[in-house]
Amino acid sequence: MTAPFKDRPLEGATPIDMSGIPEVLIARRQWACWTYEHDPRTRRPSKPPRMPDGRPADGHDARTWSSFDACYDRYTRGECDGVSYVFQEAQGLLAFDLDHLAQWRTRDLAIVQALDSYTEWSASRDGLHVWLRGRLPEGRRRRDDIEIYSRARFLAVTGARLEGTPPDIRSSPNLHAVWHRWVAA
């Protein structure tokens, strides 16, 4: 199935709620800023990670990562549209990025319920990020409008927690079953 066109929200990105972001993420120096940019290759908006000084950040180069405070400060001054977090597989954190909630609502809410961990609205307001403690075996990390982040990739963070979900990042006994059913198969 072809994914719907993903455009920059007319009202801008979901505002960051710093109080909603789990402390385990804020404490780590694994952050970057982002601003919507037009990607001429895909002809769609993108959110490339940048250091607070505007230079590119790289998911494979920790020297380009910043503190949450430095990135959030730039955000509060209106110098970027949001902040993003880079995953390091050794830390055992991952996130399910569920895009186009309007189209996949039943499936996505079933995934959120099964995983029962910190879940936030995406920057576009049409997706969810389910954050987890755990690891997955080698295999697919993307299918339809689900993408799993676990290594050397930045994911926009909003802190806009989905009502009814835990405020902390948890382990889930259903992680592998959810991965097998909706991604790996």
Image: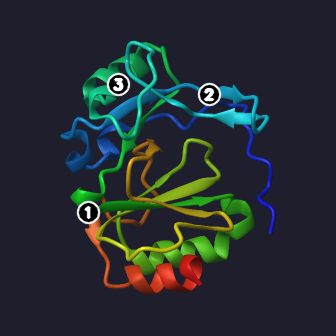
Q: Residue at x 55, y 38 (%)?
A: 14
* Residue 53 location (% of width, % of height): 39, 12
Could you tell me the amino acid type at mark 2?
Tyr
Could you tell me the amino acid type at mark 3?
Cys
* Residue 52 location (% of width, % of height): 37, 18
Name the element at disc 2.
Answer: loop
Pick the residue in front: 10 or 145.
Answer: 145
Name the element at disc 1.
Answer: loop
Label 3 to label 2: alpha-carbon separation: 15 Å
**Residue under label 2:** 36
Q: Residue at x 55, y 25 (%)?
A: 35
3 or 1: tag closer to the N-terminus: 3
Give the quarter of the figure containing the C terminus.
bottom right
**Residue under label 3:** 71
Marks 3 and 1 in Cβ contact (< 8 Å): no
* Residue 93 location (% of width, % of height): 30, 60
3 or 2: tag closer to the N-terminus: 2
**Residue under label 1:** 92
Dot 2 crowding, Cα within 10 Å, few <14, some 14–19, many 20+: some
Label 2 to label 1: alpha-carbon separation: 29 Å
Q: Which residue is drawn at 37% across and 74% down?
A: 136
Give the quarter of the figure containing the N terminus.
bottom right
Q: Single out the mark in the foreground, 3 or 1.
A: 1
Based on the displayed image, in which of its 4 quarters is residue 171 positioned? bottom left
The answer to whether 10 appears left or right of 96 in the picture is right
Q: Single out the mark in the foreground, 2 or 1.
A: 1
Dot 1 crowding, Cα within 10 Å, few <14, some 14–19, many 20+: some
